[in-house]
Amino acid sequence: MGEFDLIARYFKRPVRRAALGVGDDCALLAPAPGMQLAISSDMLVEGRHFLSTVDPFRLGHKALAVNLSDLAACGAKPQAFTLALAMPRADEARLDGFSRGLFALADAHGCELIGGDTTQGPLNLCITVFGEVPPGHALLRSGARAGDDLYVSGTLGDARLALEVFRGTRSLPQQAFDAARARMEMPTPRVALGLALRGVATAAADISDGLVGDLGHILQASRVGASVDTSVAINLIANKDPITLGNGQFDAEMALECVLAGGDDYELVFTAPASARAAVQAASAQTQTPVTRIGRIEDTPGLRLLDAQGCLRPQRYAAFDHFA
Ligand code: ADP
Ligand code: MG
């Protein structure tokens, strides 16, 4: 199968929203009058962002999910995406699974594939997403203010737990491992929540490199600090029961490491004034997305981790950094 047959077979779909899709030198996309385009790219490299053994359907899902997560963090509505794909050979079984996983998530969000590039090479996937947001309504990292509440969506740390199992440093009961692995391989982009938080949240980011790191970006951009109640945050890991020490006791250090510095969560971390608590709850209920208040924004720069008594804990969590 040649390059163009492959594109036609697995990636060419009729477009409804875009003016022109796959097949010409460019795609044409007309944003609704007066709207801003929110644009983001995320690349997935084999061995770095996913294991070679991953199910192709899940890989297709994840490649788009991590991009939609960026739109969610901006409160933008997904419209379209492009896909640049390098792969060692045209493996039809894998392409079939990959494109099915990709389009299943794309269809769920009404986001259409409008173009891309396909080449032979080491497996590497780069998606660029385009979303719409009314001017002035995008959620930015720079809007947090001292006194704001600090929230995260969903659960954190389970993807990291699965990674530890793959690395061989942990073992989990099969059911717990399957659940953690699904969080790692099929993240849920919080698009509906991001949209519902427009006009409610003062700042937002998605959590791809761990809570401490991505919250750090908000703190830096907003020139503020924060304190996080670790006795609340520790409960954000979904797979609590299997995280035990040799003696069967709950391994709190491991759980906190996963929650605070795990990465690959694709949840939202966001801030909102205390006066907006009811509005945050309404956004959470309306989008059926759990939201937890884990701390507050403060004037003093830096991140402070507190225990249940409000005492300072040692800060020893770092964000994931490809070049550190
Ligand atoms: P060009 O010769 O201009 O580089 P290509 O031959 O790379 O164009 O691609 C032909 C058409 O197929 C273009 O419309 C391009 O956007 C589209 N395309 C190529 N690869 C993909 C892909 N993986 N997914 C979606 N569209 C693709
Ligand atoms: Mg090309």
Image (spheres, grey):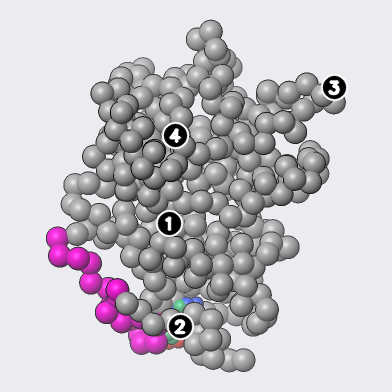
**Would residue 15 be found to the left or right of residue 214 on screen?**
left
Q: Is tag 1's residue or tag 2's residue first in the polypeptide sequence?
A: 2
Instruction: Tell me if I can see residue 302 in this picture.
Output: no
Residue type at tag 2 = Lys
Distance from label 1 to label 3 (Cα)? 41 Å
For disc 4, the marked residue is 291
Q: Quadrant of the N terminus?
A: bottom right
For disc 1, the marked residue is 68
- Residue 12 is marked as 2
Distance from label 1 to label 2 (Cα)? 20 Å
Q: Is mark 1 on a helix, strand or loop?
A: helix
- Where are the magenta residues, as a range? 17-34
Q: Is tag 4's residue or tag 2's residue first in the polypeptide sequence?
A: 2
**Relative depth, front residue between 281 and 317:** 281
Residue type at tag 4 = Val
Label 2 residue near ligand 1, CB within 8 Å: yes
- Residues packed near mark 1 inside 10 Å, few (<14), some (14 to 19) or many (20 plus): many
Vertical relation: 233 (above or below) 82: above
Distance from label 4 to label 3 (Cα)? 33 Å
Vertical relation: 57 (above or below) 307: below
Q: In which quarter of the image is the C terminus?
A: top right
For disc 3, the marked residue is 247
Q: What element carries label 2?
A: loop
